[in-house]
Amino acid sequence: MTNTPEHRIPVIVGVGEFSDHPSELTAGLEPLALIEQALKRAEQDAGAKLLSEIDSLDIVNFLSWRYSDPARQLSERLGIAPTQAHYGPVGGESPIRFIHEAAKRIARGEATVAAICGAEAQSTATKAERAGVTLPWTPFAHDAPEPLRGANYQKPMATTLGVAKPVTVYPFYEAASAAHWGQTPRQALAESGELWSRYSAVAAQNPQAWLKHAYAPEEITTPTSDNRLIAWPYTKLMVANPMVNQAAAILVTSLAKARAAGIAEDRMVYIHGGASAEEPRDYLDRDQYVESHAQNAVLKAAMALADGNAFDAIELYSCFPVVPKMARRTLKLGADVQPTVAGGLTFFGAPLNDYMAHAACAMVRKLRAGAQLGLLYGQGGFVTKHHALVLSRQAGEALAQDTSVQAEADRQRGVLPAFVTQASGTGTVESFTVIFGRNNVAEHGVVILRTADNARALARVPVQDTATLAHLLDMDRSPVGSRGAISAAADGVLEWKVG
C-alpha cells in the first residue's frame, strides 16, 4: 500500500453511460442532454451525491453539434460552478487524457470531485438533416469556431488525391506494417478479420453497444453491397461507426473523499498512472509507416507501470485494425489477444472523440468484477496522439505528474525524407491504398513513393491502368517495395506505373 495521504490518492468511483434510440427524430436528445443522463447514472453508480460537488469538469469535443461555450452551458444545466471547466480539442485519446489529468489534479490537491464526460448524437443529427427535420435542440452555434481535425494539418497533395481523411490514411500503415511483418495481404486481412470478430463478440454482450451482433471474420472482410470497400483493404465493417447517439461519464475523487461519502471499497478503482506522446501532425512528415514511435513509447511506459504483471483486461483503440495490430505486438501479446472490454469503434459505436470514455466505463466494471490490472490505450488523429492509462484494484505508488514520453518517441525517430511534388524516373512503393466508390468499384490508387534520391512523393494510379491496380490489389504478394515509373499527368499530379 502506498504511503501517499488518502486525500491525494485518486480513485474512479462512478461511471455512467446512455444510448439514445428515439422512436421519433424530434424526441432524440442533443449531446448536452445525453451527458446529463450519463452523469446522473455515474452518480447513481457511485452511490453518493457527488454532482453538486464537481469542481473539475472536462468535456470531450463534440462533432455532431456545435455549442457556444459548452462547459458553461453544461455547468448551468447541472447547477455547478467548477473551478476548472475545460472543453477539449479533437482527439480519440482525449477521454483517457482527461481522466489522467483529473487524477493528477486530485493528487496535487487542486480538485476534489472531477467529472470527465462526452456525448455525440450523430445518428439523430444526420437523419434529421437528410429528412429536413428541425430538431428542438440548443441552436447550432454557427459563430463557434470549427474544431481543427487531422485533415487541417495535411499537405495539399494529400487532399488532391483523396488521402487526407482517416479512412484513407490508416491503410498506408496497414500495408506497410503487414509487409514489414512478412505477411501477404491475404494473411494481414485474415488477422484483421479475426481481431475485429473478437471486438464484435464483446459488443454483442454489451448492453450499451450500438451493434449487438457477433460477426464472423469473413463477414467483416468480404465486400458486399452492405459492407462496401472504402479504402483498400478496409470495408465498412472494419472502420469506426460514428452514426450513434451515445454518452459516457466518469467521476473521479480522492480515496479520502470516497470513504467519507460512504462509497464501498469494492466500487473504487485506482488510477496507477499513464503516459502520452505524439507523432508529427502531418503523416507525410514521418520517417516510416511500419510502426508508431509514439505508440511504442506510450505502451512500453504502461508495461513499466505494470511492473512485470500481466494486464488481465485491455482496451486497444480500434478505429482501424492496424492500430491494435501494432499495439499488441509492442505489448508482446499473441494474435489471440482479447483486445477490448467495450466492443470497439465499429460495433460498440464510435461517438467520435468519446469512445474511450465508454471503454473506461467498461474497464471499471471489469475491474470491479474481479480483474486486477487494466490497460486503456487511446489514440487520436492519423496515428498521431497516443495516451495510455493503467487502472488497478489496488493502490500503487504516488501518481507521477510528468507523464510525457515524447523524448523517448523522438529518440527512436529516423531520418525524415524530403517531400516533393515533382519527380521522374523510378519510384519505389513505401505504402499504398486504393480508393473505392459506393459500388465497390475502384476509383484510383494512391502510392507513397521513394524516389531515386530517396525523397518521398504521393502519386496516383489511374483507374485505367488496370495492370498497376491489379498489382496493388494482389492478395498473395505485397506491392510494398515494388519499383515503377514516375510521370506527371496533365493536371500536374504525379502518377506511378509498375515496371
Image: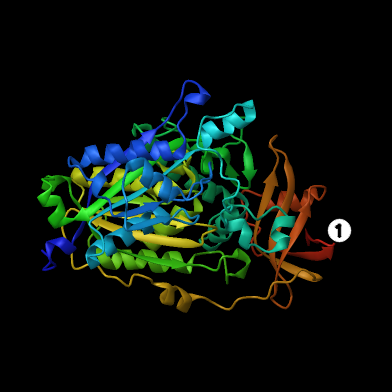
The residue shown at (45%, 73%) is 409
Quadrant housing residue 368: top left
Residue 464 position, x and y percent, is 83, 47
The residue shown at (72%, 62%) is 156
Rendering colour mode = rainbow
Residue 319 as seen in the image, left or right of residue 230 = left
Q: Is residue 340 visible in the rendered structure shown here?
A: no
202, above or below 288, in the image = above
Q: Nearer the viewer, residue 349 or 132?
A: 132
Residue 123 position, x and y percent, is 52, 33
User: In which quadrant will I find the N terminus?
Assistant: bottom left
454, above or below 217, in the image = below
Q: Nearer the viewer, residue 253 or 348?
A: 253
The extreme right residue here reads 490
Residue 209 position, x and y percent, is 40, 34
Mark 1 Cα shell of 10 Å, populated few (<14), some (14-19), many (≥20): few
35, above or below 303, in the image = above
Amino acid marked by disc 1: Asp
The tally of labels here is: 1
User: In which quadrant will I find the C terminus?
Assistant: bottom right
Residue hosting label 1: 491
Residue 146 as seen in the image, left or right of residue 52 = right
Residue 271 as seen in the image, left or right of residue 451 = left
Quadrant housing residue 443: top right
- Secondary structure at numbered mark 1: loop
Residue 214 position, x and y percent, is 42, 32
71, above or below 237, in the image = below
The extreme top residue here reads 23
Q: Is residue 313 visible in the rendered structure shown here?
A: yes
